[in-house]
């Protein structure tokens, strides 16, 4: 079946624009984002000169994905500090720009703590701001390192679970270099399998309603020269039934102490399908996504997004619009109400393994997760 869907590996895609970078032009420091709302049509950078601009970029998904949100939050705090704004106010606004990905608040708090620690140690505001920036840079670097280690652990796990190689992997949403300081989470594992010559096919869920799979994962897969095929989210069931999926690999926005996984809406149905069809369901996420302070899945705040993202097709907010109604093609009668949670929660019993940079938890238990986190803390 797969061969007829082969995609010519010709990524006619130009430069390697990083998902996020700090820049210091003469007019003052800025955060420069690769505007993910415009992909794959164009690689356009979005320059954020202040916290409100960054918050808008976060809400409208110009910058997105849990690890990158953490990095963006840390740089956002540094930006406020360097430009002389109230850092505590900035932290509050940034940390609440979106509620579900635990990394966002984590990144903001890390940079804020560095700022206050420096100030408490006698640093003036300029040096305290430099400390916040150094912390953001450290988080950025650490995420790249975590990404490489997750790729290693994830590939080893695939080899163990699926001896013989030639994996047909299904993924959901986008978890590659666009969400990370490195190659990402789940997609970093897929990339490692590809480089090892072991990726037979990447099945890419389009990821309704904002099409992170179609627009972003397909873009990254094409650039990497992977054999990939795009499917509508609701085609996944027949793909499993046809025996075409060897493993599901996804990322996470928050993993609670009991091992529940919040990720892009549509992940939970995949976990149910995977269990029914005896296919491993693997979650790949950095330690910064594990939230031992939240007891269980029911405690996660799931972001609810505007209904027009569902009642209009491809309602990805174009740059500068703030994502108002009318940016996509209407597909429902005017006034139709829509249910539009951005994420869902998969219970631990449906997760085969959680892969972090510090190792793999399988089976997924509260104790296993706590032990992994404790090991990570003690180095
Ligand atoms: O709404 P988004 O695009 O920010 O959602 C992103 C996801 O759900 C990703 O799968 C998750 O953040 C993991 S990214 C490594």
Image (cartoon, rainbow, N blue to C red):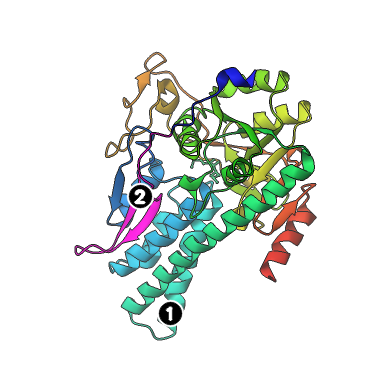
Q: In the picture, which quadrant includes the C terminus? A: bottom right
Helix, strand or loop status at disc 2:
strand
- Write down the quadrant of residue 369 in the picture: bottom right
The residue furthest left is 27
Q: Residue at 54% of width from left, 48% of height from top?
A: 184
Provide the major secondary structure of the magenta segment: loop
Task: Check if residue 258 falls in the magenta segment.
Answer: no
Please report the bounds of the magenta region as a residue range: 11-34
Residue 335 visible from this viewpoint: yes
Q: Which mark is residue 33?
A: 2
Distance (Cα) linking label 1 and label 2: 28 Å
| Crowdedness near tag 2: few (<14), some (14–19) or many (≥20) residues, C-alpha within 10 Å | many
Q: Residue at 34% of width from left, 68% of height from top?
A: 81
- Write down the quadrant of residue 12 in the picture: top left
Q: In the picture, which quadrant includes the N terminus? A: top right
Q: Please tell me whether mark 1 or mark 2 is closer to you in this view.
A: 2
Q: Position of residue 343 (x, y in %)?
A: 56, 37
Residue 295 visible from this viewpoint: no
Left or right of 102, for residue 91 = left
Q: Position of residue 362 (x, y in %)?
A: 78, 48
Q: Which mark is residue 118?
A: 1
The residue furthest top is 333
- Write down the quadrant of residue 323 in the picture: top left
Q: Nearer the viewer, residue 353 or 56?
A: 353
Q: Position of residue 296 (x, y in %)?
A: 69, 47
Q: Which mark is residue 251?
A: none
């Amino acid at each position: 079946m797969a061969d007829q869907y082969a995609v010519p590996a010709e990524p006619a895609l130009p430069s390697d624009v990083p998902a996020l970078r700090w820049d210091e032009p003469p007019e003052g420091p800025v955060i420069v984002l690769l505007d993910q709302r415009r992909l794959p049509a164009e690689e356009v950078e979005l320059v954020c000169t202040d916290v409100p601009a960054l918050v808008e970029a976060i809400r409208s998904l110009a910058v997105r994905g849990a690890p990158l949100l953490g990095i963006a939050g840390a740089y956002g705090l540094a930006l406020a500090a360097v430009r002389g704004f109230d850092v505590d106010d900035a932290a509050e606004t940034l940390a609440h720009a979106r509620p579900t990905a635990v990394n966002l608040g984590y990144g903001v708090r890390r940079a804020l703590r560095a700022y206050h620690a420096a100030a408490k140690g006698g640093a003036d505001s300029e040096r305290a701001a430099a400390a916040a920036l150094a912390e953001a840079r450290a988080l950025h670097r650490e995420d790249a390192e975590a990404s490489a280690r997750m790729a290693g652990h994830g590939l080893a796990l695939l080899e163990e679970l699926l001896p013989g190689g030639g994996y047909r992997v299904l993924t959901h949403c986008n978890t590659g270099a666009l969400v990370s300081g490195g190659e990402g989470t789940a997609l970093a594992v897929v990339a490692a399998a590809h480089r090892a010559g072991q990726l037979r096919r990447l099945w890419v869920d389009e990821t309704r309603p904002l099409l992170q799979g179609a627009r972003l994962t397909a873009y990254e897969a094409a650039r990497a020269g992977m054999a990939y095929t795009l499917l509508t989210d609701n085609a996944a069931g027949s793909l499993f039934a046809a025996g075409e999926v060897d493993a599901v690999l996804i990322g996470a926005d928050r993993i609670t102490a009991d091992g529940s996984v919040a990720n892009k809406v549509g992940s939970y149905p995949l976990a149910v399908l995977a269990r029914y069809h005896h296919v491993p369901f693997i979650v790949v996420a950095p330690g910064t996504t594990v939230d031992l302070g939240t007891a269980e899945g029911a405690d996660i705040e799931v972001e609810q997004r505007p209904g027009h993202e569902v009642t209009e097709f491809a309602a990805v907010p174009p740059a500068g619009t703030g994502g108002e109604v009318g940016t996509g093609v209407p597909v429902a009668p005017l006034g139709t109400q829509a249910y539009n949670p951005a994420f869902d929660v998969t219970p631990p019993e449906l997760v085969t393994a959680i892969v972090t940079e510090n190792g793999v938890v399988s089976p997924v238990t509260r104790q296993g997760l706590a032990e992994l986190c404790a090991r990570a803390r003690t180095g």
